[in-house]
Amino acid sequence: MKNIFTIDTEDWYHANFEDGLFTNDSNVISTVEKNIDRYLELFSENDVKATFFVLGFVVEQHPQMIKKIAAEGHEIASHGYGHQLVYKQTKKEFREDVYKSKGLIEDLIGCEVLGYRAPSWSIIEESLWALDILEELGFKYNSAIFPTKNFLYGIPYAPRSAHNATV
């Protein structure tokens, strides 16, 4: 049996439940390193590899942690820069956010970033334009659309298995 394990590598204050509740402020106490260290310990003990969808902001704040994840053989993918909901950004803002994140990661780990996951799976019907931008930026896959609908995200008719990026 082959399973896929992914981790959104962000800090506790990056949740999108309420606009303006928290900001990307390096003065806020971070818990991301402690949590990632525990994941890495468990993965090592059980010979597990995962994909870590990493925020560009986290790359800037914790570069050694990101290097450690990559050095242990895990995939590093983009989760955008600042955990902003795609459907609340303009096309230009989205392109800049994702471009910045991809560049920060690639510069740090020295290899191409292939994957992207939208913060809170926020590519919804109104923001499907983002798929074209991801393709333009060279992403090979995305894990950005949730195939159900709730108050924050989802496209209920999206396929529930690996598929072409268009819905």
Image: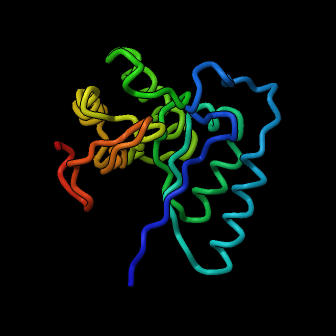
x then y, percent, for residue 105: 52, 39
Q: Residue furthest bottom?
A: 1
Left or right placement of residue 13 versus residue 78 in this view: right
Provide residue 121's location: percent of width, then percent of height.
41, 41
Say which residue appears at 30% left-offset and 34% top-offset: 124
Above or below residue 127? Residue 50 is below
In the depicted view, which residue is nearer to us: 12 or 32?
Answer: 12
Q: Is residue 130 above or below residue 7?
A: above
Q: Position of residue 137 (x, y in %)?
A: 31, 32
Residue 70: percent from the left, percent from the top? 57, 56
What scheme was used to colour the molecule?
Answer: rainbow
134 on left or right of 18: left
Side (left or right) of 26 relative to 132: right
Relative vertical location of residue 27 with respect to residue 104 in this rendering, above or below: above
- Kindly indicate the quadrant of the structure image that contains residue 88: top left
Q: How many marks?
A: 0
Q: Nearer the viewer, residue 84 or 149?
A: 149
- From the image, which quarter does the C terminus lie in? top left
Residue at 42%, 29% in the rendered image: 98
Q: Relative to the observer, which residue lies in front, 161 or 58?
A: 161
**Quick check: 107 left or right of 25?**
left
On-image quarter of the N terminus: bottom left
Quarter occupied by residue 150: top left
Q: Residue at x 56, y 28 (%)?
A: 82
Which residue appears at 34% of the width and 42% of the height?
Answer: 154
